[in-house]
Amino acid sequence: MGRLQRLLRHRWLDESDTRRAIPADVAQRLAQRVAASEQRHSGELRIYVEAGLPFDDLWHDATPRERAIAMFGKLGVWDTEHNNGVLIYLLLAERAIEIVADRGLDRHVSAAQWQQLVERMAGAFRAGRYEEGLTQAIDAVTALLLQHFPLREGEANPNELPDEPVLG
């Protein structure tokens, strides 16, 4: 894709497109699913969905992965007690999916496992079934967190990050 074509694609979409993809009722159900997930393990999940990259990122030819890593930091997903936060990032303009996991979880999960998870979600996203794709992602990340960071009986589990998806 040429630079001008990419710029136009990202500028064509805006927050209203994000709200159409993830309406308020879907955002609420996703937040509830994240909250329920976090009751079972010590990890923290965040979802970030945006229509297009900001102009500055486009100008510098940033990749969706670079943007996801930047949002991982900006949202504080890296700053959890057990270093096991996970960001599920969706960029509508490029139909790009990125999962960024903090070092506590990432050391247990191979790049191939993360890629398989993303590929499973991709079909739902390509078909415009964003809730289904994000639900699959939450469930898959939950399974990994349960495997590596289950809560022990009586273990305190403060909610370190908001559960609501961020829609940009």
Image (cartoon, rainbow, N blue to C red):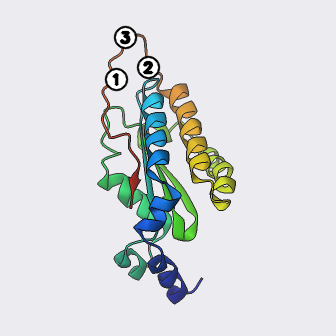
Q: What element carries label 2?
A: loop
Which residue is depicted at the point 44% across and 73% down? 62
Which part of the image, by quadrant, shows the N terminus? bottom right
Q: Identify the residue at the far top of this view.
A: 153
Mark found first going from the N terminus, 2 or 1: 2
Compared with residue 1, is residue 168 higher up or lower down, i.e. above or below? above
Amino acid beneath label 3: Gly
Q: Are marks 2 and 1 in contact (CB under 8 Å)?
A: yes
In this rendering, the answer to whether 76 lies above or below 15 is: above
Give how far across and how far down residue 138 sits, in percent: 53, 40
Tag 3's secondary structure? loop
Where residue 46 appears, x then y in whole percent?
A: 41, 45
Amino acid at pointer 1 = Asn
x and y percent of residue 58 in the render?
42, 78
> Which residue occupies the foreground of this view, 126 or 116?
126
Quadrant the C terminus occupies: bottom left
Residue under pointer 2: 151
The numbered disc on residue 157 is 1
List x then y, in percent, for residue 34. Answer: 45, 36
Q: Can residue 114 be seen by looking at this rendering? A: no
Image point 44% across, 64% down: which residue? 66
Q: What residue type is labelled 2?
A: Leu
Task: Give the CA separation, mark 1 to mark 3.
Answer: 9 Å
The numbered dot on residue 154 is 3
Residue 143 vs 132, above or below: the answer is above
At 53% across and 33% down in the image, what residue appears? Answer: 142
